[in-house]
Amino acid sequence: MITPETRSNPSDYGLPDENELLARIAGYFPEFSEPPATSYSPTVVPLGSGYRAPTHNASTPPPKSGNALYIGNVPHDKVRADFPILSEKVDGKPLVWLDNAATTQRPRAVIDRLVYYYEHENSNVHRGAHTLAARSTDAYEDARKKVAAFIGAPSADNIVFTRGTTEGLNLIAQAYVKPLLSAGDEIVLTILEHHANIVPWQIIAEETGAVLRVAPVDESGQIILSEYAKLFNHRTRFASVTHVSNALGTVTPVAELVAIAHGFGVRICVDGAQSISHIPVNVTALDADWFVFSGHKIFAPTGIGAVYGKTEVLEAAKPYQAGGNMIADVTFERTEYQKAPNKFEAGTGNIADAVGLGAALDYVSSLGIENIAAYEHFLLEYGTEQLRTVPGLRIIGNAATKTSVLSFVLDGHDIQDVAKHLSAAGIAIRAGHHCAQPILRHFGLEGTARPSLAFYNTPDELDFLAATIKEIAR
Ligand code: PLP
């Protein structure tokens, strides 16, 4: 493959004409289908210092059997009981947490893991020859292995810890893409992107004279693949795309988008902030060059996330920040850097929360992400049906492949008022632009009300949501 690092001039591309291109796309996928099946198999890596996370024993998914709900073969009420905050009352009402696209709640296993870390393992990592340094380093590096296993990365060396998706995208923009850019070069995005997957590219484009090209969506909120492919040309240096839209819930055909970008010798980043907790991800099967996600979107603490990069892009990227931990040798004349991932982890990282992220991935794996996806599919369909019974309610985003998000507007009602009324009933949803203004404006809106689901939600909660919106509609 010709890559941005190896290409010396545009004719290296062998740019195809329009017909050849469309034939090529047709060959990738005769019609849009679910993201390709992956060889995902979660691995639970034993922890270094004696802590063992409790596990469920999930297998195949009947989400509903009679009136009982299951995730895999785990009864749903048992799963809910793992999340202490779900028993919380707000203003005297039982909490109904439907703001999962903003952040998820933490299971007891993650909370306990943080307590265990601080009670038994806390130390700085990679330095010091004492027992606690060894414990914390083991716990931190075990968490990195768990991330690699969870997303199907070939090695823990391909995983860089960051504060989250936003920092990950800024890292990739500054450390890898900016040095590739000259005036007139192009970066391909889509109109579905979260601001975190727009602004970092805009900044490096302004700094270098590069331009952003933006792929459109159809009326359902799905990327139009033929239009996407047309954006690539000999000036394209990079592409970045969301796996799942946080505003609409659209699951994008990301394997096809990767194949299109690679067909033009262009590297591509996948923003996994909204896919990571809902559908299986295998970066190796997807052939993504970069993949980023945030821990707090998958039941882990805030302030921790991960960047996956193929070995060659991690090698090509410059350091993002500089200081301790990322160097092999320093003199006043020159500095030799560590290899990835340490090259990108200057200073003391968020050790405890990385360990918490490992515990969250163990928890999700113990239920089985395929089982979670099956349950949530059932829940999204159920919720969609219920909301459709509300007079004057219009669901925004109707792609054939969707997950988790039920964005809507209600005739004659301000979305902030809808969210306030729901909050008074104990139901937490988000109302606003969801940091995705371009896609909402494409639908002629400045905001939507957005309930968003996780596997601990129930059909009863969605009945209550629909009934409460009906009260507002009256
Ligand atoms: N990308 C998408 C699709 C998101 O939904 C979000 C957050 O909602 C982000 C990026 C930014 O994530 P974070 O704020 O955790 O860095």
Image (cartoon, rainbow, N blue to C red):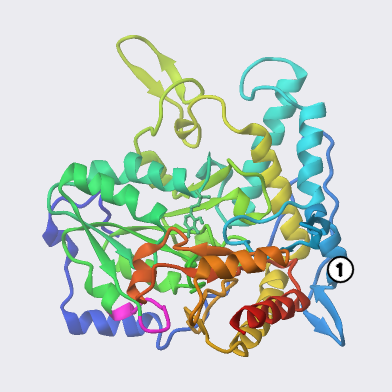
Number of numbered discs on residues: 1
Q: Is mark 1 within 8 Å of ligand 1?
A: no
Which quarter of the figure has residue 211? bottom left
Location of the N terminus by quadrant is bottom left
Does 223 lie within the magenta span? yes
> Residues in magenta?
218-226
Which residue corresponds to the image point at 66% horizontal and 35% vertical from the top-left?
Answer: 140
Q: Give how far across and how far down residue 64 sits, in percent.
A: 80, 83
Which quarter of the figure has residue 225? bottom left
Q: Give how far across and how far down residue 441 sits, in percent.
A: 34, 70
Does 151 lie within the magenta span? no
Looking at the rendered structure, the kind of residue marked 1 is Asp
Which residue corresponds to the image point at 27% horizontal and 85% vertical from the top-left?
Answer: 23
Q: Give how far across and how far down residue 403 sits, in percent.
A: 57, 73
Residue 427 makes an appearance in the image: no
Which residue corresponds to the image point at 23% horizontal and 69% vertical from the top-left?
Answer: 231
Q: Is residue 226 left or right of residue 16?
A: right
Which residue corresponds to the image point at 49% horizontal and 71% vertical from the top-left?
Answer: 414
Question: Looking at the picture, does residue 174 appear above or below residue 92?
Answer: above
Which secondary structure dominates the residues rendered in magenta? loop
Question: Looking at the picture, does residue 310 appear above or below residue 445?
Answer: above
Question: Looking at the picture, does residue 92 appear above or below residue 341?
Answer: below
Q: Which residue is mark 1?
A: 77
* Closer-to-camera residue (105/288): 105
